[in-house]
Amino acid sequence: MRSVIRKQHLPMFLSGAFAAYVVSNAIFVFSWFCYVPLFLLLANAGKRQVFFSGLAFGLGISSVIFFWMLGAAKEFSGNHVTYSIFVTALSTVLFAFYWGGVIVVINRTLKGRFDNSFLKAALVASVFVLAESVLTFCFQQMPYYLFISGYGLLNNLYTIQFASFLGLPVLTFAVICVNYLLADAILSKRWNKLLLPVGIIVMLISGGLLIKSNIDNKILSGAPIKVAIVAENVPPQLRWDEHGGKILAQRLLSLNRQAAVWNPDIVLWSESSIPWTYREDDDLLGEILKEPYPAQTTQIIGMMGEYSKSEVYNSAYAISRDGRVIGKHDKTYLLSFIETPVFGLNMPFQDLDGYLIKNGEGTKPVSTPKGKAGIAICNEIINPEASILQVRNGAEFLLNLSNDAWFKDGAIIEVHFLYGRLSAVINRKDVALNSNNGLSGHVKANGEVLSKRKSKDMFVELATISPNNYDNSGNYHPFLVPILSLLFFLFSVCTRRISNSG
């Protein structure tokens, strides 16, 4: 018996690692069959094996998606090796148990349910949607723990269009349905069953094409806005001290000179590009403003905003050509354990020098001479509510300032950019993104990626964005698919109990 279990565990681990690589890197084509090995293995799993098989699958996923933590947590906390090992191990164990539970639920809900393959696929997809909804609810402020099976469909211009109505859950539902139906066709060796999953894929792509065509005709864009994306790409090891301060200042001023050549309407810097509290007489800021920009150029620059002696805001300042602050966005949705404590615990962040981050109330866009900018700092782009509220208050385009230096070697930077693309589609607004050591670029309101760039070197990228007044919030219903999934799941449970009692 033990040898049988061991034989099951290694394939489960490998299938988890494969699924994790595909999902975390959002590989569109492989997304349609990345869970097929899981479903094939589950079909042959004994009752006593299921939970441990789920653990093995979860460990496989964890080995891929948490690989970056060892190095990043060490650097992030100032070389606390023990802390990085503890965080990585805890994350791995918790995620393994999460998947163990999910696999058990899937296995039990399928027993004695429906003879129809599509209904079985819909039931499994419902379980995935519900599990990922719980994961999102618990870890919205810790996005490095989010693992959403529908990520790959964000990487296609047409399948992403459905998210403008139903959010990520509908993409997960579609992906899991297709994966299960493919596995079912393989197990039954009835190859005519392949027509259904292939038909679903064709329907999604063709339907997305129609949605995109429709929105292209609906959106009326205003005068184009030139945004200079100033990507500093500062290594996390290089700090603003006696050794690195001069290097960093020269780096920023060199980029500033390059940006001024483009005569931009907006200069978009990254999160905390000047990592200290804003002062009107700041010398470095004064040097930046000396460049001969056009009179209406606005600098959107990341700095700390003063709140009290021990607390600061993580802010984006909008500064006019003459040095006036014409607007400010204070980050509202803080990263748990990093920017805000959970149960009194916080990561020993090496760069805050004892300060705590205060959450702001960033529901209003920042007014610039060229239009109203909805601003999202770092993980705020992952929370749709953050940008939806600003769009309702008049935002005509979106700007995302981030710092992905700690995650630069992981797949998180790809997912981060995809959330920017998702935000563009949900809000039907152009999005310009500047992520230090991550992916920077420009996404159109219809989801089309016009630029996407990652580099170890600093650069300036010019994006020409199109503002608009279209409000999609009335069409966006992200809870509909989870609610329907819950109802279907409960229906299947009730029908089984009724049939058993009869």
Image (tube, helix red, strand yellow):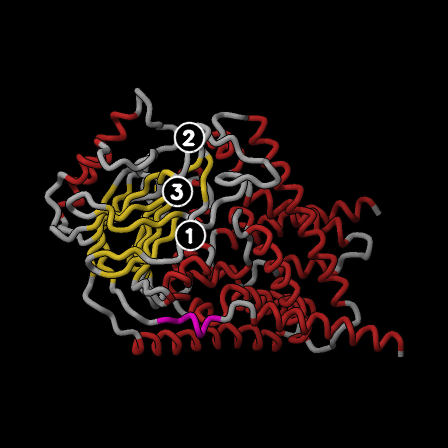
Residue that appears at 28% across and 51% down: 327
Which numbered disc flags the more N-terminal residue, 3 or 1? Answer: 3
Give, as a three-letter code, the residue at label 1.
Glu
Q: Is residue 324 above or below residue 33?
A: above
Which numbered disc flags the more N-terminal residue, 1 or 2? Answer: 2
Residue 204: image tag: none
User: Would you call the spot at circle 3 few (<14 residues within 10 Å), some (14-19), or many (20 or more)?
Assistant: many
* The C terminus: image quadrant: bottom right
Q: Is residue 362 above or below residue 120?
A: above
Residue 43 at x, y percent in the picture = 73, 62
Which numbered disc flags the more N-terminal residue, 2 or 3? Answer: 3
In the image, 473 versus 72, the foreground residue is 473
In the image, 480 versus 446, the foreground residue is 480
Q: Is residue 386 left or right of residue 188?
A: left
Give, as a three-letter code, the residue at label 2.
Asp
Please tell me whether mark 1 sits on a helix, a strand or a loop: loop
Disc number lying in front (1 or 2):
1
Residue that appears at 41% across and 66% down: 426
Residue that numbered label 3 is attached to: 314
Residue 361: image tag: 1
Residue 353 at x, y percent in the picture = 43, 28
Alpha carbon separation for disc pair 1 and 2? 24 Å
Alpha carbon separation for disc pair 2 and 3? 13 Å
In the image, 492 versus 272, the foreground residue is 272
